[in-house]
Amino acid sequence: MIEGHCLCRRIRFELAAAPLIVLCHCSICRRATGGPFEAAATVPTADFRWIAGADEIRIFESSPGVERSFCPSCGCRAPSRSRDRDIYFVPAGLLDGDLADTRALHIFVGSKAPWWEIHDDWPQFEKWVPGYGPDDGA
């Protein structure tokens, strides 16, 4: 199991695996994290379990249909369950342990910060991964 928690440890959870890390370069994710992208593990709900604090999480709708969860105590981002898919988005920085075998990809590289360069060979998508965004009818 991979464990994770917020800064103050009020919110704690575990996952069986983190099969994919998505690096989102859209302007909303950049503002939400204060960095050049957001790194989030996409975890099937069957592989995710709350340990503590799930009932204390606060939610902010950053854009229509997109919710960002956070700890009310330390303000740290928290895992969010997708409204339309059976997955959790887990901020990767909250995870403990080795994620070396986890795949990764970049989305919304068409709107990435002009001062940031991507130097890895992970797959890149201008917007959504085909078949997974609202632009595809998904």
Image (cartoon, rainbow, N blue to C red):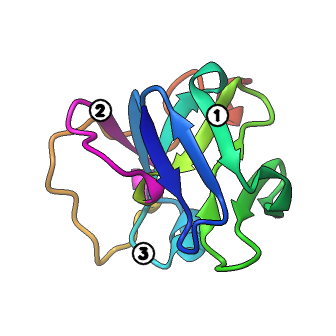
Question: Looking at the image, is mark 3 or mark 2 nearer the viewer?
Answer: 2
Between 69 and 111, the residue placed more toward the observer is 69
**Towards the viewer: 84 or 100:** 100
Q: How far apart are marks 3 and 2 (CA)?
A: 21 Å
Q: Where is residue 125 in the image (x, y as percent from the top left)?
A: 40, 39
Asked if the residue under mark 2 is in contact with the one under mark 1, i.e. CB atoms within 8 Å, the reply is: no
Q: Residues within 10 Å of mark 2 (few under 14, many from 20)?
A: few
Closer-to-camera residue (60/57): 57
Identified at 77% across, 54% down, the residue is 67
Q: What element carries label 3?
A: loop
Left of 45 or right of it: where is 102? left
Q: Which of marks 1 and 2 is nearer the N terminus?
A: 1
The disc, 3 or 2, on the residue closer to the chain's N-terminal end is 3
Amino acid under disc 3:
Gly
Residue 96 belongs to magenta span: yes
The residue under label 3 is 35
Query: Which image quadrant: the N terminus?
Result: top left
Q: Mark 1 points at which residue?
A: 49
SS under mark 2? loop
SS type, badge 1: strand
Between 50 and 22, the residue placed more toward the observer is 50
Instruction: Tell me which numbered mark, 3 or 1, is placed earlier along the sequence.
Output: 3
Which span of residues is magenta-colored? Answer: 94-110
Picture coordinates of residue 89 (x, y %)?
59, 43
Please determine whether, in this image, residue 134 is positioned above or below residue 137: below
Mark 1–mark 2 Cα distance, whole angstroms, equals 19 Å
Give the residue at x 80% y 36%: 83
**C-alpha span from label 3 to label 1:** 28 Å
- Mark 1, residues whose alpha carbon is within 10 Å: few (<14), some, or many (≥20)? some
